[in-house]
Image: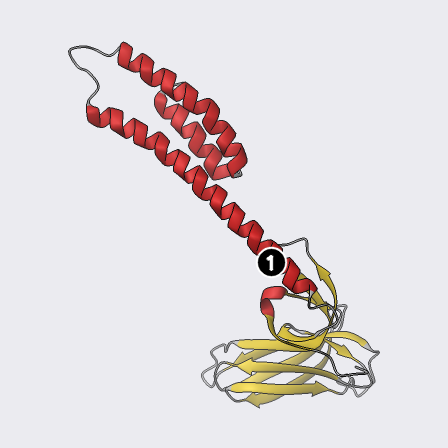
Amino acid sequence: MDIASASAAVQAAVNGNKSSAASAALTGNFDTFLKLLTTQLQHQDPTNPMSSDQFTQQLVQMSGVEQSIQTNRNLETLLTANSIQNSNLSVSLLGKEITGSGTGALLAEGEAKWSFAVAEDAPDTTLQVINADGAAVYTEKLDATEGTHQFAWDGKDSQGSEMPDGTYFLKIVANGSAGQPVAVDTRTTGVVTSIDLSTTDPLLTVNGAQIRYSQVLSVKTPAAGS
């Protein structure tokens, strides 16, 4: 192993592992680096000694690796703190009524509601209600103007048959007057019934579907009896 290889080995640990593993690699490889550097100085050609620039460059290279490890450690600490904060805040949403970016809504007592925001006028807009099996049960076309819209579905499919209560999803495809796609943000409102804390951005179960904590737009205490 030469000096460059010793430095590269540590850098690989920084790039591919957590800071704790990288620190362990640094400890072992830094000792190797110092031994190689000392040996190189002892056996250098007296008529062509290592320049101060070369010596400094090699020391700076290892110092840069150490700084990278420390930066990674600090980032890991920040991410952990952010994850803990998100978990604590998301747990407080249990039983609360939230509105967030999501497509799932509950059909109950013959009605399911969504809201959606259109980035610009979209005269060619298609709304599809999708059941839990992924099948489209209802389709409607409309001329959507820029802004926020409300959509209430009466629970009947395109043939007029009543669909069973449960979770349904709204799929919207919007196109402008020139046929260009238009951005749509679909929103759902419901009570948070459970929370998955296995990710840094907790998943909230609302209306039988999951939305991310970061997608929550508003929170309120549900009305009595809802």
* Residue with the mark numbered 1: 85
Q: Would residue 18 be visible to someone looking at this image?
A: yes
Q: Where's residue 210, x and y in %?
A: 69, 66
Q: How is the image coloured?
A: secondary structure
Q: Position of residue 76 (x, y in %)?
A: 52, 46
- In the image, taking residue 18 as reference, residue 163 lies left or right, namely right
Percent across and percent down for residue 54 are 24, 25
Left or right relative to 43: residue 7: right
Q: Quick one: which residue is furthest to the left in this view?
A: 47
Q: Secondary structure at mark 1?
A: helix
User: Residue at the location (42% across, 19% down)?
Assistant: 32
Task: From the viewer's perspective, tell me whether residue 204 is left or right of residue 33.
Answer: right
The image quadrant of residue 70 is: top left
Q: Residue 17 at x, y = what percent? A: 52, 37
The foreground one among 206 and 125 is 206
Q: Residue at x 26, y 28 (%)?
A: 56
